[in-house]
Image: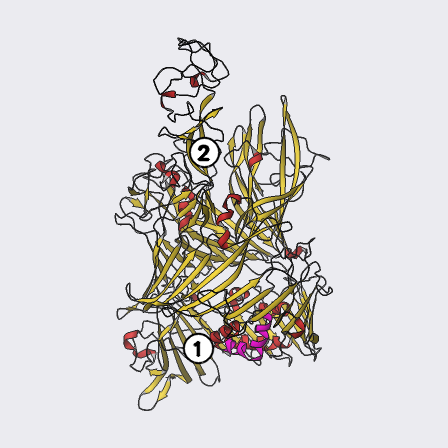
Amino acid sequence: MDLLPSLPVKVDSTLPQDLLPKKFLSKRKIILLISGLFLSSLIILGIFFSKNISTLLGRLGVYRLMRNVGLIRPTVPGYFEALKTQNLVYDYNNDGVVTGEDYSHLVAASSKKQTEPTATPAPTEAPDGSFQEATVEADEVNAASDRVTLPSIRAFGTDSFNGAATVDYPIGLPQGSGISVPGLSVNYSSSAIDDMFIGVETKWRNDASHSYQKQASQVGLGWGLSGFASISRDTQGTLNDPNDDTFILSLPSGSANLSKESDDGAYSVWRTVPNLKVKVERYARCKMHNYGDGSMNICRYSWTATMPDGTKYYFGSPTTQASWKRANDPDASYFAEGTGNDWFPLYETTNSYGTRAWLIYGSDFKGWHALTYKWSLYSIESVYANSEAKAFYSDRFAFGDYQGKKYVSAVYPAKITYGLHEAAFEYEPRSDKATHQGDRATPEQPIKSTDRLKKILVKSRNQVQNAYTFEYIYGYRASDHPDPNNPVGGKAIHSLLKKITVWDSDPAANASAKRLPSYTFSYGANCNGFSGGCPLTSFNSDSGTTQVQTPNDFFLREADNGLNGKTVFEYFTDGGGGNALSVQYCDPDKIDFEERTCKTDHRYNIQTHRVAARIDYDGMGNSFRTALNYSTNTPLAYVDGYGEVEYWFDGRNCCKASSSGSCRVGVPSGCKCPGDSYTGVTNHQWDCSGGTNCDWDSRSRTDCSQDYPREYVYRCTNPANSNRYICPGTNRNPNMTCISNCRLSYNSNPFKGYEFLGYPDVETVVYEKNSASDVAARSKSFFHQAIQTASCFKPSPLKGIAFKNQVYDADNPTKYSEEIQSYRVRFGPMFATETELADSELNSYCPNYNQNTKVSLVLPTESVAKSFMPSPTLCTKSTTDYNNLDGTRDAYANPHKTTNWGKVSCTNPSQDDTTDTPRYSYSDYTSANATRWILPLPKESWMGSSNPVNGYNHTRIFYDNQTYGNLGDRGQLTKTQTLIGGNVNSESTIAYNGTYPWQVFRTTDPYGRRTTTYYDGIYKIFPTQVTNDAGQTVSTTYDFNISATNHPNYGGNRGLPLAVRDANNAITHNVYDSWGRLIRTYLPGKNYTDAKPSSLTQYYYFNEDEQSPCDVSTNCLVGLGKLLNGTYTPKMLVGSATYYSEVGPAGVRPGNHSYYNGLGQLVQSRQVWIHEQWENLGIPVEGEGYRDLLTSATYNSLGQAEYSSSVYTAQPYNSYPKILMTLVIL
């Protein structure tokens, strides 16, 4: 079946002269701007609560407008979530509530929209360097059938606070039944390379024989796999002393230290630092091990972390077993098993899978035992506590040998299962595994992997939905490794991730598997004897300014989305060509052994690299440069210990000496300098107080007291006359000497606790297209870093949070807007006495603050906005109060009152400008369900005065069919009320399925109209039948339950709606490609077997260099994305057509070809008309023959349309060079 002949893109040079002026906004842009201004004005007016905003937007028709222009795209899964949340984006009939009546409107709109591929709003780079996305529902991203996947570089970014280059590549997972599993992604951060080497002596970074000290992750150097959770043990460098160990909770969203709140030995409660409002419980089972004349308690733990919504994360298998012994369990020989002797097993019975990774500790005398260093996520359980509403995780272990015992040397994520879905991880051997520890070729208990990630298979009902494959190269110095597949031990070589490809099935099992364009990554062209890329330079000694390229410094240089969209990262380079930056780092008292305040040397690899600029390419010859400018080239960091050897003289009347020979008085307390009045300690001049009689001539000092080490016994001399002291209370002179009650100790202050605190500020400059000098936008952000006094230094609990942002007029920097955000921090346990301080008071709290154990909760309290022209001309303020409405403390720190003050004094923002009136928004909350750890949810909100009777937009919410203000065991919304004058004006209810309580079974709107929904019996999340109050039913059949074996999507498991039967018994059929994208729609009266569908869509993103054969079956067009008259053409084409009549060989149909650049921006659209015969291709224009309707657009560096042509006519494709072939539907 032919669709349409293809149309070549028209490059800029061929555009007619009737283009509208620069900065022209298209109709869509104007609509979006108006919508944005409207939303902004609502916020300014103080409409704070989303429920009230949603209601007003719906009644004014704003949602309808935004749906029509494509700013928001409601989806079928989102609709059923909206039945619970009452997201009025889904209120199609504008009656103020989401009910079953809206479903048929959604289905109709979706069917129409699915034939009209629309570009995802292109991510635009804001002045602060971040990418601003159009606001969409979370499920919209995963609804492949509801949208077209367009080119994007939003995965490529920078972290302006620490100057890192970043990549975030998501791994799509199917929607679960009653449970949301954390999203998987593969992530890159250039800062991870610097972090990896922290703590390793700098001299090894480029050592000739021992440069390979740290191994890259299982996804390559600088890369990681996120979406997992764990609890880890920090041994503080004392493996054999578990008493000083601390624990860290790692979640997909970040990590936090754990602080113990209570402990009875068997059960303990912990809180996170900072306070994430997560309850962590530890269950201990201990066994007493007796040895010789001593004993030791050996404990194993299971952990549970409960999120604020009641979802539970279990770490380590949660139950003990009577038969706990395993072949590789180090403690199996010490304890009995069986009834009454149960214990937590270290791993599963079969294979090497488990959730506890351990090291070996102890001694020959005490025995060698297992010490768990990581508890991996075992399972997630939602509040529904249903078997379908759980997820399970498993890891595969690799074992190493130590002291005749086995320890876990590597942990490999193996599988995630939830409901009927699964993500499985496959690995391949890696050569880069022969690390050294210092100059030791055989480190003790090294943690290193022998495999790296090769593939991720995403399955539903054991059918592969997508496969992600990973390809690598090695980065190394060529002279170090003649054969990189058999590298020389101890010399650095690193796996570098080169390519990620997603397939519609497993390519190893299906030779016909289709792929999308691969994401590729480059670390530079080989240079200076290095292979795999061109490394940056680094310091390789503790001091000095010399930098060299090393095989440990392969940083990401380019990232390409496979559709000609690319980001290039440029790194900081100093005047001498060096890329590394020194870091100023401080310990808690700032003073080091040499009495210096903080340090800026490079010991223990304390150095960093940062991005200076990123350049984005659209694949059509245009580049967009963004520079990151920092006010300092010396970022800040914190350490618990400097890692230096300090010379302490322990004992009475002793002092700590510096290498300069001066005595530090007062450290430790009671220290007295030699001779009471002399400060010199050179030549072993001691205070003789407490001396012991010894024979003067005894060089061996054998007759001196044996209470002191002999090597620390010295004669005392008087520095005033060089005579030996006469010890007080003695009369023997000169046959008298003294030994000091001090002994010299080489006490090491270990290097530990490094925490990078970033930069104080960053200026982000976006340049005009294809320019590195013409500024398009400029902004500056200022960050919190540390709290400190003259003798105290700690990481701020606000670290990394911007307290001030400025956005400048690009043409006049004296004109700018500024926003200042103020915070308060609560220190201490949630349910006990806390200390609450403003951000301006934190420095004084430094001596009392332990960032590892002190629970802290950050509260944004005030925002002041100022406009400078260049003097401040308009200043506004808003504040948020976290106390209960009666003024008492809310332990959960919920926002109860928000005040939009409007105008305030610019010189003193605390002084209100009374020319306008403040606007108040209030919210009150339910009690918590402490047993299930479901924290308080909003129960009432209104605007106006503090008295809700006089408020407006007044809403009440009920949960779990409980009385007002109480929660059940799920936190599900079951009733909402709107009130006027304190009286109930309207009410709507939601009822849930008793067996599968995540399913919305019945809704009742304010008019008493009921809508009932039934779901599929397989996944239990897809609606199969919706019946409204009038008894009208819409039913849906999916790919996994359709009975027609001849349907192209029969046997699928993507949850694709293949047939929708409306209330009039009319059926609309849909057909999808192997990616779940809609390609054909058959309106009622047609069947999916008909030759001519009602509408169809085709996707092209490969050219003949990438696919063979190059045709529609491979999404390939000859010449796509290649040079045309010296200019690159778009790399993606979406063609669509709608049949109005089937008369003639070609039928009567309009068609549209949409061309997208590498950033996903629509650069050209061509509309054609075919009338019965193929020779009637195009729109007849008198005197000109057939023409097409064509519009073109170009974009500036902010992603805004700078040129948008009026619709004009152009010749059909066949008058152009035949670079693009005819589009064909198979």
Q: Residue at x 51, y 59 (%)?
A: 172
Span of residues in magenta: 49-68
Q: Position of residue 105 (x, y in %)?
A: 59, 78
Identify the image quadrant of the C terminus.
bottom left
| Scheme of colours in the image | secondary structure
Q: Position of residue 360 (x, y in %)?
A: 54, 32
Determine which of the numbered discs, if any, sits on residue 959 in the image.
none
- SS assignment at label 2: strand
Q: Position of residue 430 (x, y in %)?
A: 43, 43
What's the amino acid at mark 1?
Arg
Give the side of residue 1011 with respect to residue 187, left or right.
right
Q: Between 620 and 826, which is closer to the camera in this rendering?
A: 826
Report the magenta stretch's main SS. Answer: helix
Determine which of the numbered discs, if any, sits on residue 28 in the image.
1
The reply to whether discs 1 and 2 touch (Cβ–Cβ < 8 Å) is no
Residue indicated by mark 2:
749
- Does 1126 sit above or below residue 260? below
Q: How many numbered marks appear?
A: 2
Magenta region includes residue 55: yes
What's the amino acid at mark 2?
Asn
Identify the image quadrant of the N terminus.
bottom left
Q: Give me the C-alpha separation between circle 1 and circle 2.
A: 63 Å
